[in-house]
Amino acid sequence: MLLKLDALVRKYNMNIRGVIHVGAHTGEEYADYLDVGVVDVVFIEPLLECFQELELKFKDNKNVRLINKAAGSLKHEARIYKSTNQLASSSLLKPKQHLEQHPDVNFYYDDTIVKVDRLDNMLSPDDDHNFLNLDIQGYELEALRGLGNIIHDIDYVLCEVNRKEVYEECAQVEEIDDFLAEFNFQRTETNWAGDSWGDAFYIRKSLL
């Protein structure tokens, strides 16, 4: 994460009851959640190679739930562009400027088919998770659209955003802003350390 979670928690006096982390990779951020006192986490990760690592890491942790899917606005199956940087930049979208910015990272198709589903199909309305972390390489807006009514239970969104076409037809930060503004969220922090991409933090306006 380009934005430090502990600093955000202090600055905004955040009360995080649980985390939905979409694009979990191998769960590297769990230590950050523990540091701010959060143990209840749902990790969502479509790639089997990463998911198996998650299973090994959290097999004895009853506070962590694992879901082996990609998040989108429609339920379907899709091929995924897999990256050579330990799969960290893999995306449902075709890489574009990423190829120029990180020429050391290559992408490839194999026979991998991932299941894509809406978050409101994967999650229960009874779940008490109010922090959403999206790190899915340009597909963030599609995942947000798939939240349905669950978005009303979310207080905080930490989201990777783009201001250039890092992946083909990826949503730009203004589109994320506009979508979340409809549900009374405001972007209050942005870190563009990636130049064309970065991390943004959105908070429900009533909590400001």
Image: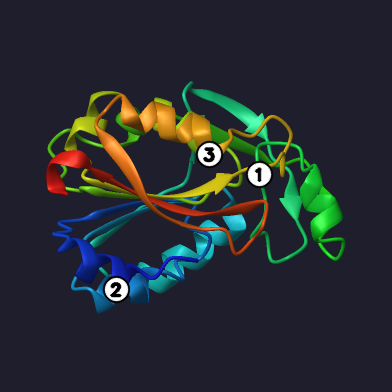
Residue at numbered disc 1 = 91
Neighbourhood count class around disc 1 (C-alpha, 10 Å): few under 14, some 14–19, many 20 upward: many
C-alpha separation, residue under disc 1 versus residue under disc 2:
28 Å
Residue 30 picture location, percent across and down:
36, 70
Whichever of callouts 1 and 2 sits on the residue coming sooner in the sequence is: 2
Which of 86/162 is in front?
162
Residue at numbered disc 3 = 173
Residue drawn at x 75%, y 55% is: 83
| 166 is higher (above) or lower (below) than 106 | above
Mark toward the viewer: 2 or 3: 3
Amino acid type indicated by mark 1: Ser
Do callouts 1 and 2 mark residues in contact (Cβ within 8 Å)? no
Residue 49, quarter of the rendered image:
bottom right
Q: Which mark is residue 6?
A: 2
Which of 136/155 is in front?
155
Secondary structure of the residue carrying tag 1 is loop
Which of 17/70 is in front?
17
Number of numbered callouts drawn? 3
